[in-house]
Amino acid sequence: MQTMEQVIRRHCSLEDEDLEWLTQLVDEWSLLADLAFADLILWVPDVDDNVFWAAAQVRPTTGPTSLEDDVVGEEIAYDPEHLVTEAYLSREICHTSGNKLHAGIPVDVQAIPVLSGDRVLAVVEMHTNQMGVRAPGALEDAYLEAAQVIAGMVHRHQFPLGGDRRVPWVSPRVGDGMVRVNRAGLIVFASPNALSAYRRLGLTSDLYGEDFVAITRSLLQERAPVERPVAASLSGRGSAELDLETSTANVRLRVLPLTGEDGPDGLLVMCRDTTELRSRERQLVTKDATIREIHHRVKNNLQTVAALLRLQARRISSPEAKGALSDAMKRVAAIAVVHEILSQGFDSSVKFDDVADRLLRMVGDVATTGGKVRMVREGSFGYVPADVATSLSLVLTELCQNAVEHGLRQQSGEVLVRPLQQDGELVVEVVNFGEPLPEGFTITSSTSLGLSIVSTLVADLGGQFRLATEGDATTATVRVPLI
């Protein structure tokens, strides 16, 4: 399915600012679809304005759809009797006379040209399924009245408004609760859900006929900062979203100033009871903070263990014992690096480049060769699951240390680390150009503890490990699935 930008870039000659306006319109137009109980299609004129292309489509959440199929990417060839063409040419909002049939369903159609100066940027076509029309009542009448005001604003290039942008996962929608405020600032309609939200804030009276700002402030007397965005919304400076919080409830408001043909036409306010949502968010934040603290403490404990091993190594005269403790210290330090990175973020995955770069510096600093060793990373590890990162850090440390001690030995040189993610698999190559592997060498016959650790950890991760000399390069290759 094509995106709106793809359709417009391919077929239209709109300026970037016009595309940005239409993008904002599509971001916000679900409000109009819900209020009008209608499917919306955005038609944009071709370079040849005898042709129109469907660039975007949205269905209502408040009523049945009238368009079963997606029409984005379809076109209307020259048809002077088509409602979209009529609206485009007349520059006026056009309606069908009588109901059209779509797949046997009677549908009311309205076309709204989107004006910008002397140009028509696009046409919004509204399709209302007449078979699913809700029984008329105060709620439905308030919805439809607000829909007509917003349709006029779309027509006059006044909607979407400036100000706060809608946040899809938390911003209130029409069905969450709606309040209509007239030009005098008095509430002339409040849906049952809106009234329930205000009741949770502590309202004991009715909303109808009350001053919107005054009644809202009265519930939040100890939270004066809330008054500023409410007042700003009333002044018509764009849409605003604000959270109302009391000791018992949280309610999020989305306040939209409306404009009629003769000027300001009050406010449309949507309310969403977010009490449970905020409670869950606080629980998640608490859990995330706890997990970060655990990683931080594990890191500190591991660093303490590494320091103890270092102290013990200094007090031992046996070279073999000193080397074994030194190796153990480096392994513990490698695990500590992973927990330090995990303690700095909330994610379940690790940006492993940061871990790898620290490990390479650590290995290079403690290299036992008599020459100068450069540790070089070529490529990116990308993000690695946290449960893989610890084992991978040990594997990388062992392979780099092995390349320095057994490959370069007392020589200067460099060790190349080449990571690559492809097809859900991480491939890491550790390359040195020092001494080749002994004749007849195999991993299974090796007595090296480091290689044994690598083989075991890679096998536990469901991966593969290979070590071979080809030409003047000895390469350790690790393949680990990440999915």
Image: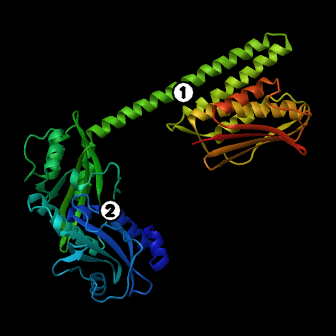
- Mark 1, secondary structure of its residue: helix
Q: Is residue 207 above or below residue 246?
A: below
Q: Which residue is mark 2?
A: 28
Q: Which mark is residue 295?
A: 1
Examine the rendered structure and indicate whether residue 389 appears above or below residue 113. above
Q: Amino acid at mark 1?
A: His
Badge 2 amino acid: Glu
- In the figure, 247 relative to 306: above or below? below
**Residue at 18 percent of width and 54 percent of height:** 178
Residue 49 spot, x, y in % from top left: 39, 86
Quadrant the N terminus occupies: bottom left
Instruction: Report the quarter where the C terminus lies.
Output: top right
| Residue 445: quadrant of the picture | top right
Which labelled disc corresponds to residue 425? Answer: none
Determine whether the residue tagged by mark 2 lies in a helix, strand or loop.
helix
Q: Could you say which is closer to the camera, residue 42 or residue 342?
A: 42
Q: Is residue 73 visible?
A: yes
Mark positioned earlier in the residue sequence (1 or 2): 2
- In the image, what residue occupies the spot 60% across and 19% down? 301
| Residue 26 % position (x, y) | 35, 65
Rounded to the nearest angstrom, the CA distance separating label 1 from label 2 is 41 Å
Residue 381 can be seen in this image: no
